[in-house]
Image (spheres, grey):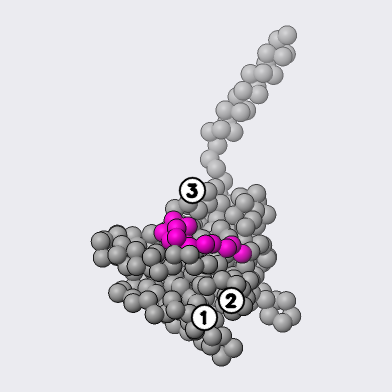
Amino acid sequence: MTILKLSAIGAMLAGALLAAAPVVAKDYKSITIATEGSYAPYNFKDAGGKLIGFDIDLGNDLCKRMNIECKFVEQAWDGIIPSLNAGRYDAIMAAMGIQPAREKVIAFSRPYLLTPMTFVTTADSPLLKIANAMDTLPLDDMTPEKQAVLNTYRKQFEGMKFGVQAGASHETFMREMMPTVKISTYDTIDNVVLDLKAGRIDASLASVSFLKPLTDKPENKDLKMFGPKMSGGLFGKGVGVGMRKEDPELKAMFDKAIDAAVADGTVKNLSQKWFGYDAAPQK
């Protein structure tokens, strides 16, 4: 009986000592980064099946700055956050916007890219005739003038068929801000584009950093961007690296590396290479 009591006391003391012990910071030697692999020019595969794009180039640069080895893996968009929290990889670099709903379940680095959203349709669409009162439309601080612009598009879009990638901020925006449209969701943005060109949908919504390189290609001369370039609000604070909330050391490492990549012009140069314009955030 005495032995049992002593054992119990010893276990309690050991537990107390473990609870009081300082948490040892993780020593990151290598990490795995998930990307979608089907969102050019951010992340996609070349003819040989190798992952390439802006996210891949920047991710490799950031890993060199952090002095760690990085491996990119492909992950479908609809499971990319659950799989992160399940521990299947350490970070996400997949053109993911830093949005309030996502910040509830994962942590983000500081933004590594700022890109507005806009609409796209075919070159013969009547939607191109909509008068645009504002070229840029920040949505964080709504005013009557900004709301009037959105109301104009909401009215003109009534009954139209819009295609968006499922689970992306574009779907959220269209459902909440443009409730008069008919929405079709797709597993990838590439399939949205295919249906738009085939006439199965009337228009779509995507980031300018995706649409500009797309519409600049001669084979896509039948596609045109239109409407205001929208930012903030439901679209979030920019594009960032997603991580688990319990990995603050990794977040700090990414933040420091992104600071340096923005400051020395690396992000600017890579965005000009892949998107055709400077989408770097402020230093």
Q: Which residue is mark 3?
A: 104
What span is in magenta? 174-186
* Label 2 SS: loop
Magenta-span inclusion, residue 144: no
Location of the N terminus (image quadrant):
top right
Residue 118 visible in image: yes
What distance separates the C-alpha of mark 3 from that of mark 2? 38 Å
Towards the viewer: 125 or 68: 125
Tell me which amino acid carries mark 2.
Gly
Disc 1 or 2, which lies upstream in sequence?
A: 1
Is 51 displayed left or right of 209 in the figure? right
Neighbor class of circle 1 (other Cα within 10 Å; few <14, some 14-19, many 20+) is many
Q: Which of the numbered marks, if any, corresponds to residue 199?
A: 2
* Label 1 SS: strand
Q: Which residue is mark 1?
A: 122
In percent of width and height, residue 238 lies at 44, 65
